[in-house]
Image (cartoon, helix red, strand yellow):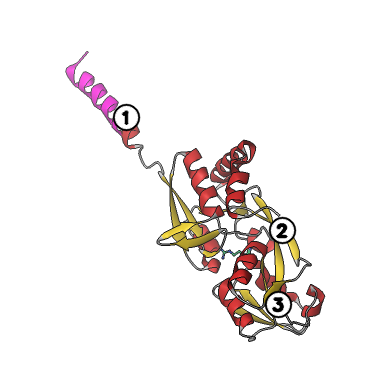
Amino acid sequence: MKLSKILCGALAAVMTLSLAGCGGDKKTTLVMATNAEFPPYEYREGDQIVGIDAEIAQAIADDMGLELVIEDMAFDSIVPAIQSGKADIGVAGMTVDEDKLQNVDFSIPYTTAAQVVIVTNDSPIASPADLEGKTIGVQLGTTGDNFAGEITDATVERYNKGFEAVQALGQNKIDAVIIDREPAKVFVSENDGLKILDEDYTVEDYAIAVAKDNQELLEQINTSLTKLKDSGKLQEIIDKYINAE
Ligand code: ARG
């Protein structure tokens, strides 16, 4: 065999090895977009983003052998961030609905949730049916925002943070807030004179959003999520933040 040929073969072997060694351009991070204004699913504790969604995403990243990177942004920026590839997944108490399904795909659900109505203790509003013609506060771009917009003669006040809508209600600037149940419980406990109506507005599912053209990632997420469900780890994470009633 000619020397040049031997050298060439050796070189090719080294190149293959080094490529495998560096992992080529293989992804090593899983970028999660969220809006950390939504306890107990995601909120800030010091400079950390914690909560149910942060822990679920961490467990999924661990299972996939990737490093989790959390990007905090406005809630209505999450879907565009996934579409543009700025983020791989959206984990933000995201309700699976027709609206979002036009722009992203969703994993299997990881929990059920509900939209509820918050009012002041002395409010004449006793059930969701009484919301007609009222001024309703919501977090911009959420399911609550969509529902409020469908109520006859209602005026919708949109806030960047759900907590701001609840504060406005406490100051009697609006008549009610439509928001997800668990954050509602946290916000009501932090503001005097408010209550959650007994009757839920809707029941819905939360799931993880992925770009529409990323079938492979979607399947990986579903596989990891299924493992978390089967092992009981998912329920353990939820129970850590939400007291069973
Ligand atoms: N479940 C609602 C939705 O999907 C609200 C979610 C708000 N989440 C947040 N992290 N701020 O529209």
> Quick check: is the Cβ at mark 2 less than 8 Å away from ligand 1?
yes
Residue furthest bottom in the image: 173
Q: Earlier in the sequence, mark 2 or mark 3?
A: 3
Callout 2: SS: strand
Residue 157 appears left or right of 201: left
Extent of the magenta region: 1-18
Q: Residue at x 40, y 41 (%)?
A: 26
Residue 42 appears left or right of 184: left
**The C terminus lies in which quarter of the figure?**
bottom right
List the residue tagged with mark 1: 16
List the residue tagged with mark 2: 204
Q: In front: mark 2 or mark 3?
A: 3
Q: Amino acid at mark 2?
A: Glu
Q: Are marks 2 and 3 in contact (CB under 8 Å)?
A: no
Q: Is residue 86 visible?
A: no
List the residue tagged with mark 3: 119
Quarter of the rendering containing residue 187: bottom right
Using the numbered discs, state the Cα–Cα distance from disc 3 to disc 1 in whole angstroms. Answer: 65 Å
> Quick check: is the Cβ at mark 1 less than 8 Å away from ligand 1?
no
| Rendered view: 23 above or below 107 | above
Q: Is residue 4 magenta?
A: yes
Q: Residue at x 62, y 49 (%)?
A: 239
